[in-house]
Amino acid sequence: PIPHVRPDVSGELLHLVDSPEPRRARLLSHLPGQVLDYDRTSAADRRAVGAALARLSLALSDFEHPGAERSLPWDLQQVGSLRPLLDHVTDPGARDDSERVLDRYDESVGAAVAATRQQVVHNDLNPDNVLLVPGAAEPVTGILDFGDMLRTAVVADLAVGMAYAVDAAGSGDDPWTGPYDVAEGYLAVRPLDDDEVRLLPDLVRTRLAQRQIVNSWLVSADPANAEYTGRSLVRSAPALHRAVTTPAPIERG
């Protein structure tokens, strides 16, 4: 369930808008549903989110495009390059947690994820990019915003989606309940190799640290847009801390 590009009245897929700063507009088909809120989802809804992402991943498995070979700060395989931006994280606890994650990434995670399967992926399954009808037989009605697509690790795409479900309402004392609901739905459609599955907890933590670092840097680099870029910092900091300090199911004895 993705939006489709529609031609304008002249048949063009990209329409040049006449304005002081020229823009190109694209017309997309409308999709029903409401923006995903993990605090209002059931385990079945979260599994459906994972399953939808897996179907998209499979659909993209043979997709190739020169534009997919790019450098992007939101690529989990490029997190090691973010260390110089740590000073922009003003919350001392979040900065310490982020540094701890980067240390582990440099020690082992980065090399391990680079050795896994690679393809073009969506790379940004955050709640704003998912439309949902909670409780429906097919809850996911839309996956939006393909602006962060690139070639990276297949498992990274799932970890990105899981990271936003940390501390979902109804998870009780375990911050991993929501993320592993998403993973369960995904793995039922697209199984991952054992080495990929073992990387999931570290990659979820890496995404949460990435959000702290990149968004903190964007806040300082563009104060006029700080309200938008900084809106996730307050919630992602405690989620990062809980993920760092709580073993994931696969890490428990």
Image: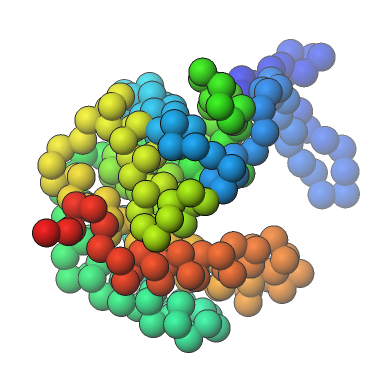
The image shows residue 154, relative to residue 77, as above or below, that is above
Q: Nearer the viewer, residue 9 or 165?
A: 165
Q: Quadrant of the C terminus?
A: bottom left
Q: Position of residue 101 (x, y in %)?
A: 31, 71
Q: Residue at x 39, y 28 (%)?
A: 51
Q: Residue at x 15, y 37 (%)?
A: 193
* Residue 65 shows in the view: no
Q: Position of residue 252 (x, y in %)?
A: 17, 59
**In which image quadrant can residue 35 be found?**
top right
The image shows residue 49, relative to residue 113, as above or below, that is above
Q: Residue at x 63, y 67 (%)?
A: 230
* Residue 90 shows in the view: yes
Q: Quadrant of the N terminus?
A: top right
Q: Position of residue 79 (x, y in %)?
A: 35, 63
**In which image quadrant can residue 182 be found?**
top left
- Direction from residue 228 to residue 46 in the image, left or right: left
Q: Nearer the viewer, residue 97 or 116?
A: 97
The image shows residue 219, relative to residue 141, as above or below, that is below
- Direction from residue 104 to residue 173 in the image, left or right: right
What colour scheme does the image use?
rainbow
Numbered-mark total: 0
Q: Residue at x 88, y 49 (%)?
A: 20
Q: Position of residue 197 (x, y in %)?
A: 20, 45
Q: Nearer the viewer, residue 115 or 194?
A: 194
- Direction from residue 14 to residue 164 in the image, left or right: left
